Image: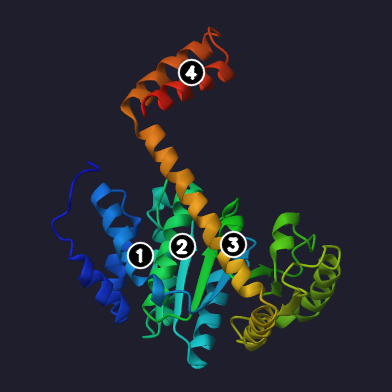
């Protein structure tokens, strides 16, 4: 089926012109091409991305993650609405490696951010589906470029669920925001050290009502915890603030701090350095994904693997030897 060519595809130039003119319908259709696994669509996607590349990159890319129950959707909606009042166009994307089951329906449900999704200067897109986190991340990164070319100058990329997706989001954004709760037992809530280390800012959400005092205590705890980590190459010292998405307090402070960060890293050269590093890594990620696709997509490899699996189970061959044999077979296919 991968060689099948859908009849409802537009010309390459129609996609390019539509994206560059900010046509939301064409933007959505172009992202569908990006997310497709059809070989004809993959070629079309590469042409579209190459053509819009000069118009991309003019945004602040913000990664957002948080512990379960932190109110991430409510925060993103309040934050997105604030950015729009400041004159920005906001695109919201997500990375959800499990979305091959849900087909991205979590973010696709517009009731999650109903007010924001109805605003002309907001664009919300479900997570790409895919079998690997790397594949999903690459498609999200390409979708981000399309959104930038369409005129969106604030890109919010959220993680859905927990796992390695935080690292993927951090690897394609300029600023990484961690949402936490106060008064939920252990204040550090078992958050992985690696995720804390990636954070440019920690926001204690739901800082309202009975939670106000607890939120201030949590803010001090997180501020102290962040001092343990070595200073980032960016030169930025991570900050901890409080916010209430429902009361709409502290949202402006979040944006003010991000603006300060952008000014600092633009002046010291880290902004461009980080973007360039991400582009190089993105190339290698694409190479890795394409090699995986070629390897596991081969009929010969699939049949040989099923034989080797049986031999491993029966202890006729070691896993290491089996891996060596299958790699040798793959290498011979190029001779």
Query: In this rendering, would 319 be left or right of 36?
Result: right
Please tell me whether residue 38 is drawn above or below residue 111 in the rendered image.
above
Helix, strand or loop at mark 3: helix
Task: Residue at 22%, 65% (x, y): give it.
Answer: 12
Helix, strand or loop at mark 4: helix
Image x and y of residue 271, in percent: 62, 74
Which residue is tagged 2? 141
Q: Can residue 294 be seen in this view?
A: yes
Task: Residue at 43%, 82% (x, y): give it.
Answer: 115
Is tag 1's residue or tag 2's residue first in the polypeptide sequence?
1
Is tag 2's residue or tag 4's residue first in the polypeptide sequence?
2
Image x and y of residue 108, in percent: 38, 65
Which residue is tagged 3? 277
Instruction: Give the class, few, some or many, for how many residues have Cα within 10 Å of label 1's Cα (few <14, many ≥20).
Output: some
Question: In front of the other: label 1 or label 2?
Answer: 1
- Name the residue at the front extreme: 335
Q: Would you identify the image quadrant in which residue 67 lies?
A: bottom right
Question: In front of the other: label 2 or label 4?
Answer: 4
Helix, strand or loop at mark 1: helix
Instruction: Give the class, few, some or many, for how many residues have Cα within 10 Å of label 2's Cα (few <14, many ≥20).
Output: many
Is tag 4's residue or tag 1's residue first in the polypeptide sequence?
1
Which residue is tagged 4? 325
Which residue is tagged 1? 49
Count numbered badges in the picture.
Answer: 4
Please tell me whether residue 208 is drawn above or below residue 9 in the rendered image.
below
Is tag 3's residue or tag 2's residue first in the polypeptide sequence?
2
Query: In this rendering, would 168 be left or right of 116?
Result: right
């Amino acid at each position: 089926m991968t060689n099948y060519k859908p009849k409802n595809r537009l010309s390459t130039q129609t996609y390019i012109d539509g994206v560059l003119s900010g046509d939301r319908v064409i933007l959505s259709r172009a992202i569908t091409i990006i997310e497709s696994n059809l070989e004809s669509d993959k070629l079309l996607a590469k042409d579209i991305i190459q053509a819009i590349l000069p118009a991309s990159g003019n945004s602040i890319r913000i990664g957002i993650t948080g512990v379960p129950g932190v109110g991430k959707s409510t925060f993103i909606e309040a934050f997105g609405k604030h950015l729009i009042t400041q004159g920005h166009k906001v695109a919201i994307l997500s990375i959800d490696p499990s979305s091959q089951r849900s087909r991205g329906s979590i973010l696709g449900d517009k009731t999650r951010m109903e007010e924001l999704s109805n605003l002309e200067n907001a664009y919300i897109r479900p997570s790409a589906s895919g079998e690997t986190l790397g594949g999903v991340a690459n498609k999200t990164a390409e979708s981000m470029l399309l959104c930038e070319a369409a005129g969106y100058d604030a890109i919010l990329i959220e993680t859905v669920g927990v796992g390695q997706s935080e690292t993927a989001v951090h690897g394609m954004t300029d600023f990484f925001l961690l949402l936490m709760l106060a008064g939920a037992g252990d204040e550090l809530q078992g958050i992985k050290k690696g995720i804390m280390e990636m954070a440019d800012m920690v926001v204690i959400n739901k800082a309202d009502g009975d939670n106000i005092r607890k939120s201030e205590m949590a803010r001090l705890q997180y501020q102290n915890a962040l001092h343990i980590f070595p200073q980032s190459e960016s030169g930025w010292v991570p900050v901890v603030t409080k916010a209430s998405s429902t009361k709409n307090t502290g949202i402006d402070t979040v944006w003010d701090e991000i603006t300060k960060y952008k000014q600092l890293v633009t002046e010291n050269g880290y902004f461009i350095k980080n973007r360039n590093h991400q582009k190089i890594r993105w190339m290698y990620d694409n190479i890795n994904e394409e090699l995986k696709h070629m390897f596991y997509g081969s009929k010969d490899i699939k049949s040989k693997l099923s034989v080797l699996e049986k031999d491993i189970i029966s202890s006729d061959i070691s896993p290491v030897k089996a891996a060596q044999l299958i790699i040798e077979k793959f290498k011979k296919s190029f001779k």
